[in-house]
Image: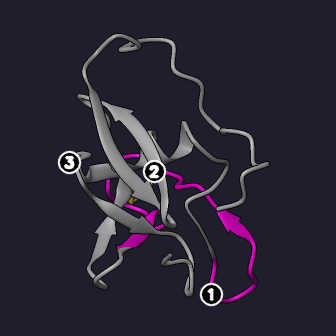
Amino acid sequence: MSSNQKPLLHRIVRKDHPAIAFTLDGVPCEGRTGDTLLSAILNRTDSLRRTEFTGEPRAGFCQMGACQDCWVMTETGERLRACTTPLVPGMRIVTKLGSVA
Ligand code: FES
């Protein structure tokens, strides 16, 4: 994750819900109670990952668990579908290989 990336999503609700700490590519981040991984990540940056075929940025498509476009990984290698996975405190998510601090 680059620090100059602008968020793709902008929070208009749940602004005052309790914060949930997680890391994204080794960078401490904060989501909100009720966020999915997808909403928490895209409130921080502009993509979830790069496609392994062309390197183009991907940010999910269907938002309902059907398209398989939103896979991210934990630092331990677990694959998670970002749009259907609730954000949990302490999650350590990586969006690209070699991004673990
Ligand atoms: S955005 Fe389609 S499966 Fe997650």
Question: Residue visible at 75% across and 72% down?
Answer: 56
Depicted 60 relative to depicted 17: above or below: below
Q: Can you tell which quarter of the image residue 39 is in?
A: top left
Q: Can you identify the residue that label 3 sits on?
A: 88
- From mark 2 to mark 3, how far is it between C-alphas? 14 Å
Cα gap from disc 1 to disc 3, whole angstroms: 27 Å
Q: Depth-wise, is mark 1 or mark 3 nearer the camera?
A: 3
In this orientation, which residue lies closer to the viewer: 83 or 73? 73
Estimate the x, y position of residue 81 in percent, counting from the top left: 33, 64
* Dominant secondary structure of the residues highlighted in magenta in the image: loop
User: Label 3: few (<14), some or many (≥20) within 10 Å?
Assistant: some
Question: Residue type at mark 3?
Answer: Val
Residue 61 colored in magenta in the image: yes
Dot 2: element: strand
The residue that mark 2 highlights is 28
Mark nearest the camera among 2 and 3 is 2
Image coordinates of residue 91 in percent, x first then y, are 27, 58
Which class describes the residues within 10 Å of circle 1: few (<14), some (14-19), or many (20+)? few
